[in-house]
Image (cartoon, grey):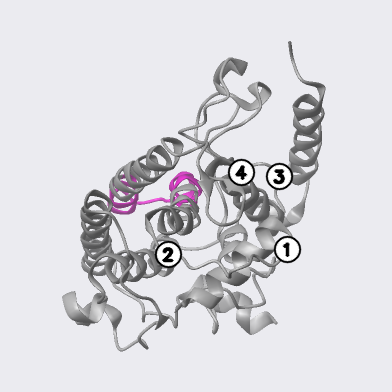
Amino acid sequence: MRNSSPFSFFLLLLLLSHKASCDPRCEPIKASDVDRVQFAMNLEFLEAEFFLRGSLGQGLDSIAPYLAQGGPPPVGGAKADLDPITRRIIEEFGYQEVGHLRAIYTRVGGIRRPLLNLSAQNFETLFDRAVGRPLQPPFNPYGNTVNYLLASYVIPYVGLVGYVGTIPFLESYNSKSLVASLLGVESGQDAVLRTLLYERADEKVEPYNMTVAEFTSHLSRLKNELAMCGLKDEGIMVPKELGAENRTTSNVLSADVYSVSYSRTPPEILRIIYNSGSEYKPGGFYPEGGNGRIAQSFLKKD
């Protein structure tokens, strides 16, 4: 029997998505291929540093320092207390992100690594906002495997939907082939992370008396609110009305009513990764804002 509460929630999301489709804040931007691809490096730097430091305790400067282009080292970041299998997976992801940065640097040229905030305090602020109250003790992404996976849940998917939103506006074959190839691996990473979390969906995240699935729902809701363009992010468990063909509550892969990927524009992405809801107001993972023409163009208008 269908629960009326999830159905009402579904109707509300549809209404919000319809309003978002008419919102000028959700319209595509004008930019060159190079600027669009280089914008993605902001996310690739974040993923590379987070995965490398989480698995190895050292970042890009120890692996391929030239790719940072003289940008400052991140604030915070630490080797996480991961189980052996997760550590190997995250280490592999870290090296893959280095490859992504190298691919963009080689094909279209690079940008300077922006200042990144990977501190436990930054994640604490994000998670407190997501759940609507201060967590006690403060959330520490590096404390254990589950916490690190939940922290990882925040990051790669944003880059994935960004690539989906970029491809239709690229003009050259070189740019399209590059971004399509990057998207393939980003999608794989996100699928692995969501699967690892789904395996633990009903587990309580100690000591918060909240399940893994509930945390992902809160985090997805926050990302949707920050981006201000409707439903484009979903937790690992959803009402049937949001499941594939309305037949499942599992949501290992986040997708729309046709089971195709959501997409986001650069302003939407900046609103999320700044944790400010504004592409003009840096913060969150990027205390001084992103680099490249697109990100910098919004900072100059502030």
Q: Which mark is residue 230?
A: 3
**Label 2 environment density (alpha carbons within 10 Å; few <14, some 14–19, many ≥20):** many
Q: Are marks 3 and 4 in contact (CB under 8 Å)?
A: no
For the residues carrying marks 2 and 1, which lies nearer the camera in this image? 1
Residue at image mark 4: 214
Residue at image mark 1: 133
User: What percent of the width, then of the height, locates residue 165?
Assistant: 51, 48
User: What percent of the width, then of the height, locates residue 240?
Assistant: 64, 21
- Residue at image location 75% in from the left, 30% down from the top: 10
Q: Amino acid at mark 2?
A: Leu
Q: How far, Cα to Cα, is label 1 from label 3? A: 23 Å
3 or 99: nearer the viewer:
3
Height in image: 280 above or below 208? below
Q: Amino acid at mark 3?
A: Gly
Q: Amino acid at mark 4?
A: Glu
Secondary structure beneath label 3: loop
Q: Quadrant of the C terminus?
A: bottom right
Region in magenta:
162-180
Q: Which badge, 1 or 3, is on the more N-terminal residue?
A: 1
Tally of marks: 4
Residue at image mark 2: 43
Q: How far, Cα to Cα, is label 4 from label 1? A: 14 Å
For the residues carrying marks 2 and 4, which lies nearer the camera in this image? 4
139 or 181: nearer the viewer:
139
Q: Are marks 3 and 2 in contact (CB under 8 Å)?
A: no
Q: Is residue 274 visible?
A: no
Q: Which badge, 3 or 2, is on the more N-terminal residue?
A: 2
Outermost residue, top side: 1
Q: Are marks 2 and 4 in contact (CB under 8 Å)?
A: no
Magenta segment, prevailing SS (helix, strand or loop): helix
Height in image: 159 above or below 301? above
Q: Which badge, 2 or 1, is on the more N-terminal residue?
A: 2
